[in-house]
Amino acid sequence: MSEGVATPAADPVALPDRQPPRRVPPPQAASRVGVARLLLRPAPAVGAAILLLFLVCAVAPGRIAPYDPLAFDYRALLKPPGLAHPFGTDNFGRDLLSRVIWASRVDLQIAIFATLFPMVFGTFAGCLLGYFGGFVDVVFRRLVDVIITLPFVVLVIAIVAVLGPGLTNMYIAISAVGWIVYARLVRAEVLTQRRLDYVASGRVMGYGAPRIIFRHLLPNVAPTVVVYWMSDMALAILLGSSLGYLGLGAQPPTAEWGVLIADGKNFLTTAWWMSIFPGVAIVLAGIGFSLAGDGLAERLRRRA
């Protein structure tokens, strides 16, 4: 009887190390992380802090301003900056810091109201023009050619001069001209997007034009519009202050940065603070919108 031959045991197959599946954060958490990282960067954080400061001043100026912005004090005419009046006083003894704080409400109102209608209407018109084209698109392009040949500020001043000075007429004048810029921007974006595969797929699946435009095209062009809107609000503050300086915007005794600069133009050699501090506020607001807009643009580019 032959003895059985022992066979060597087979080596176990080495299994690869299994790592636990990587958790993907939900969209809300990823969005919060992205915003936090954005705010930790110096430039967007500075811009957001400046805008937050002006927003607080605009929402509750009565709780922040130390004096009544319209109260006359003939015992404190043209006082230089000091402990009692950090920004000094004007030729009627009114506290300039209080007037600059109250003016932030009017100027932020200008930034929003002067750009909101042009942004909404221009985006809607640009989507339709870019998607459908046709005779209306040809007319729009001719209108753009005419508007571009004329300076934007000159057109606004001409319309306000016809309608009369005031904030409401200023909003009408800016809206009547400003929507064309948004429509031109959105039209160009839609012309690019409608050639992509997802638009053709929507047509093949039987989607109607409204669904393709407002459910697919509009979300893809919205980031560009929002970023431009941020910079346009800074320009609206500059334009509103310029019209206020010329007497075509906010009217005295309303506290508005352009009006404050105009009040101090005759006292530059004796009371420089009357024009300097409102001018600094305009510059800071422009810087805030610009830095926040740049940070928002970078955030949207990363998401894309």
Image (cartoon, rainbow, N blue to C red):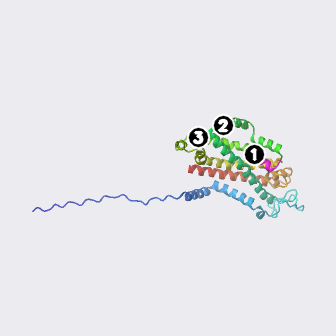
Query: How many residues crowd mark 2 within 10 Å: few (<14), some (14–19), many (20+)?
Result: some
Q: Is residue 166 visible?
A: yes
Label 1, on which residue? Answer: 174
SS at circle 1: helix
Q: Main secondary structure of the magenta part?
A: helix
Q: CA distance from mark 1 to mark 2?
A: 22 Å
Q: Pinpoint residue 233: horizontal percent, then vertical percent.
A: 71, 50
Image spot of residue 297 (x, y percent): 62, 49
Rendering coords of residue 125 (x, y %)? 67, 43
Looking at this view, is 65 or 152 the one in front?
152
Q: Nearer the viewer, residue 103 or 158?
A: 158
Whichever of callouts 2 and 3 sits on the residue coming sooner in the sequence is 2
Secondary element type, mark 3: helix
Residue stretch in magenta: 165-173
Q: Tag 1: residue type? A: Ile
Residue shown at the point (65%, 42%) measured from the top left: 126
- Indicate left or right for 210 with 256 as reference: left
Circle nearer the N terminus (1, 2): 2
Q: CA distance from mark 2 to mark 3?
A: 15 Å
Q: Please tell me the numbered disc located at residue 192.
A: 3
Give me the disc on residue 139: none
Dot 3, how many residues are within 10 Å of its Cα: few (below 14), some (14-19), or many (20+)? few
Which label lies toward us, 1 or 2? 2
